[in-house]
Amino acid sequence: MAINRSELVAAVAEKAGTSQTAVNGVLDAVFDIFATSVAKGEKITIPGWLAVERTDRAARTGRNPQTGETIQIAAGHSVKLTAGSKLKAAVSNKK
């Protein structure tokens, strides 16, 4: 079971008593800030709910599964999401 973006927008708009257009604009702005901040290496923390940060991946040696040939995989970046205490408590109470 998953909620897509339009369902999330509708639920937030109903709960907040505002329009779906306004909620959609806010979500776009939040995700834009997340993307630009994390891309710059800044950590975003919403206390109790979540933390988002960029992580570094070192260069490593891999293997081509089709040929078995070893290849060099370049260093790169990834994104790490960490659940906060309120989110963990909400999940553990649902059974």
Image (cartoon, rainbow, N blue to C red):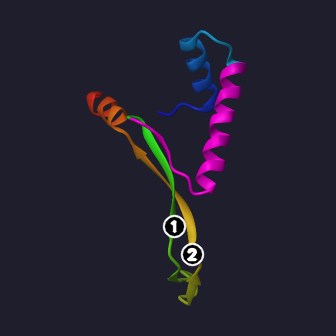
Report the residue marked by disc 1: 56
Q: Earlier in the sequence, mark 2 or mark 1?
A: 1
List the single residue furthest toward the top.
17
Q: How many marks?
A: 2
Q: Position of 49 compared to 32: left or right? A: left
Give percent across and percent down for residue 59: 53, 79
Q: Is residue 66 above or below residue 36?
A: below
Give percent across and percent down for residue 29: 68, 34
Residue in view at x 64 percent, y 41 percent: 33
Residue in view at x 68 percent, y 14 percent: 19
Please name whichever residue, 92 or 23, is drawn nearer the observer in this view of the structure: 23
Magenta residues, start to end: 21-47
Give percent across and percent down for residue 16: 56, 13
SS majority, magenta: helix
Please name whichever residue, 54 or 42, is drawn nearer the observer in this view of the structure: 42
Is 91 in the magenta? no
Task: Give me the disc on residue 34.
Answer: none
Q: Position of 89 compared to 80: left or right? A: left
List the single residue furthest toward the bottom.
69
Q: Position of 29 compared to 60: left or right? A: right
Hey, which quadrant is residue 85 in on the image?
top left
Residue in view at x 67 percent, y 41 percent: 32
Distance between the alpha carbons at the discs numbered 2 and 1: 8 Å
Report the residue marked by disc 2: 75
Confirm or deny contact between disc 2 and disc 1 (CB under 8 A).
yes
Q: Helix or strand or loop: what does disc 2 sit on?
A: loop
Give percent across and percent down for residue 95: 27, 29
Instruction: Judge the density around disc 2: few (<14), some (14-19), many (≥20) Cα neighbours within 10 Å.
Output: few
Q: Helix or strand or loop: what does disc 1 sit on?
A: strand
Hey, which quadrant is residue 17 in on the image?
top right
